[in-house]
Image (cartoon, rainbow, N blue to C red):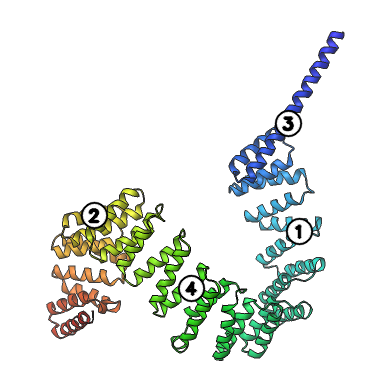
């Protein structure tokens, strides 16, 4: 008997030890899974949490974390199920319930989400984030009265804030109660004056052309915060719209020189002004607008958005020297950023300064060695316009070799190779290049047009050319070049009556700016016996050539 008892005790001890070791393994696996989750390795974390749950199905935290992983991995149904299990196991946990309600929102189950947050507030009445989320749900479903009551609950617990009063204001506007909305702002400012709400009141009065009241509100806002952008810019706009330009530019100067004012607010405002600027306003006040941009540059010399905004302004006002200086300065200040480099290249492209484009591409090639396609696209355009067609072909072939699987790159490369070969007189390689381009995309209109036009000039395969240009016109029916091409092919086929409507159409969409198009039209008119009208277009074509 003693031996039996001893053996039983040993067995119990062994089982107990095994159970402790097993639990330690589960705990360690859970902690490893949490670390994976925190490190962002969600797939691995989800798999490990699944193993933890298999060993310990009652581990509510594992269900919760697995649910979070699944939601982030877009495994929505599984995520909702896991989070539901966590809530079932511990209904008192705020985070579990919050995550489940948010999951319902993500899966479009708005009613369940609303019920979840209503229950959260009942269980945790002092958790403010649940109130704000529930307010947004009510607003989304158009239940404005409940949204207002929820805002009232927030204010009872936490006091009034800019956020609560502005939400109430927007709700009342949506309910088409503008007087109540305005009253809510005024009452709040009587008790808790704030720059944000005072500026909004100023905007309201400015919209009613009550300039003195608007400025009074803006000034009250600025007494609380001298550099509050909406108040400063609102005040400036009142002066501008009332044509008090001395006060306007004085206010604008104060804004642009103040380093405390957010530079983004400055760039947003000046960009908006430039987009909607009356040309006469620019003409009359260019010197002062120049000064505003220079003030902003002085206040924020290293801000790329400030420099870019000023560069665009000076370019739009034909001060290309200053614009170039600023674009180049941005490249120098931000040598690793692609955007300033692209801005500079685009500036040179708009100026058709092809030599500068090539110079710029060469200076940037080491900086953007891992992104050469950006530079090559600009370089190809420059070399083509400089008639360095052999260089274009070499660069295009290099692009195809480096990105053989990129259909867009290959299509553009074969297209420009075709144009370049044609310019060099190598028709065979030109047509082969166009064929390769159309194999990638049979409906690329520019290739269809160029291919058809060169076949027409070559006087061969006019049927094939007509078929291609007809397809190009189906894709872009108002393209002047395509209208000219089809009209000319029909003329070559002796179908001048059919050709004439295409040229008439072209004249409405920019054909009068093309010497070639007008000469082609004149030849068609002559073939139809309309010599007087043909003379008009030949005269216009000659005048256009003289101007160029």
Residue identified by numbered label 1: 118
Residue identified by numbered label 2: 433
Distance between the alpha carbons at the discs numbered 3 and 1 = 39 Å
Residue identified by numbered label 4: 309
Q: Residue at x 30, y 63 (%)?
A: 381
Distance between the alpha carbons at the discs numbered 2 and 1 = 66 Å
* Residue 36 percent location from the top left of the image: 63, 42
Dot 3, how many residues are within 10 Å of its Cα: few (below 14), some (14-19), or many (20+)? few
The kind of secondary structure element at disc 1 is helix
Could you tell whether 302 is left or right of 104 in the image? left
N-terminal of the two: label 3 or label 4?
A: 3
Dot 2, how many residues are within 10 Å of its Cα: few (below 14), some (14-19), or many (20+)? many
Query: In the figure, 279 relative to 339: above or below?
Result: below
Distance between the alpha carbons at the discs numbered 1 and 4 = 48 Å
Could you tell whether 333 is left or right of 215 in the image? left
* Residue 413 percent location from the top left of the image: 29, 56
**Residue lying farthest right?**
2
Quadrant position of residue 526: bottom left
């Amino acid at each position: 008997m003693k031996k039996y008892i001893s053996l039983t005790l040993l067995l119990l001890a062994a089982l107990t030890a095994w159970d402790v070791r097993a639990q330690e393994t589960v705990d360690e696996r859970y902690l490893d899974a949490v670390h994976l989750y925190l490190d962002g390795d969600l797939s691995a974390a989800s798999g490990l949490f699944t193993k933890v749950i298999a060993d310990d199905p009652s581990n509510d935290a594992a269900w919760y974390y697995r649910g979070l992983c699944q939601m982030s991995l877009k495994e929505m149904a599984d995520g909702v199920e896991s989070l539901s299990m966590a809530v079932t196991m511990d209904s008192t946990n705020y985070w579990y319930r919050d995550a489940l309600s948010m999951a319902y929102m993500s899966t479009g189950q708005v009613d369940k989400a609303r019920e979840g947050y209503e229950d959260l507030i009942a269980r945790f009445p002092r958790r403010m984030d649940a109130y704000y989320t529930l307010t947004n749900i009510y607003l989304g479903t158009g239940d404005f009265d409940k949204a207002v009551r929820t805002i009232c609950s927030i204010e009872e617990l936490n006091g009034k804030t800019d956020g609560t009063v502005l939400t109430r204001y927007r709700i009342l506007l949506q309910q088409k109660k503008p007087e109540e909305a305005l009253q809510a702002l005024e009452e709040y400012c009587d008790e808790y004056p704030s720059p944000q709400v005072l500026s909004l009141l100023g905007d309201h009065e400015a919209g009613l052309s009550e300039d003195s009241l608007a400025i009074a509100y803006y000034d009250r806002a600025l007494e609380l915060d001298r550099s509050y952008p909406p108040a400063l810019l609102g005040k400036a706009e009142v002066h501008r719209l009332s044509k008090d330009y001395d006060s306007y530019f004085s206010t604008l100067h104060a804004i642009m020189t103040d380093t405390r004012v957010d530079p983004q607010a400055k760039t947003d405002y000046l960009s908006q002004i430039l987009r909607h600027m009356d040309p006469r306003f620019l003409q009359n006040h260019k010197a002062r607008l120049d000064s505003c941009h220079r003030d902003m540059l002085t206040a924020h010399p290293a801000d790329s958005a400030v420099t870019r905004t000023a560069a665009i302004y000076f370019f739009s006002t034909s001060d290309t020297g200053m614009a170039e200086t600023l674009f180049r300065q941005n490249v120098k200040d931000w040598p690793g950023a692609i955007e300033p480099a692209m801005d500079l290249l685009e500036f040179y492209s708009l100026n058709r300064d092809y030599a500068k484009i090539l110079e710029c591409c060469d200076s940037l090639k080491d900086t953007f060695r891992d992104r050469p396609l950006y530079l090559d696209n600009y370089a190809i355009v420059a070399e083509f316009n400089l008639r360095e067609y052999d260089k274009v072909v070499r660069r295009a072939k290099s692009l195809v070799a480096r990105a053989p699987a990129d259909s867009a790159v290959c299509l553009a490369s074969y297209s420009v190779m075709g144009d370049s070969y044609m310019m060099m007189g190598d028709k065979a390689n030109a047509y082969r290049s166009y064929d390769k381009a159309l194999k990638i995309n049979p409906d690329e209109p520019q290739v269809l047009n160029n291919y058809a036009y060169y076949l027409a000039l070559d006087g061969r395969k006019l049927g094939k050319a007509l078929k291609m240009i007809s397809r190009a016109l189906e894709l872009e029916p108002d393209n002047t070049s395509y209208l000219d091409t089809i009209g000319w092919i029909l003329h070559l086929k002796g179908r001048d009556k059919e050709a004439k409507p295409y040229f008439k159409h072209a004249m409405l969409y920019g054909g009068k700016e093309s010497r070639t198009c007008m000469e082609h039209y004149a030849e068609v008119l002559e073939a139809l016996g309309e010599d007087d009208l043909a003379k008009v277009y030949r005269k216009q074509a000659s005048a256009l050539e003289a101007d160029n």
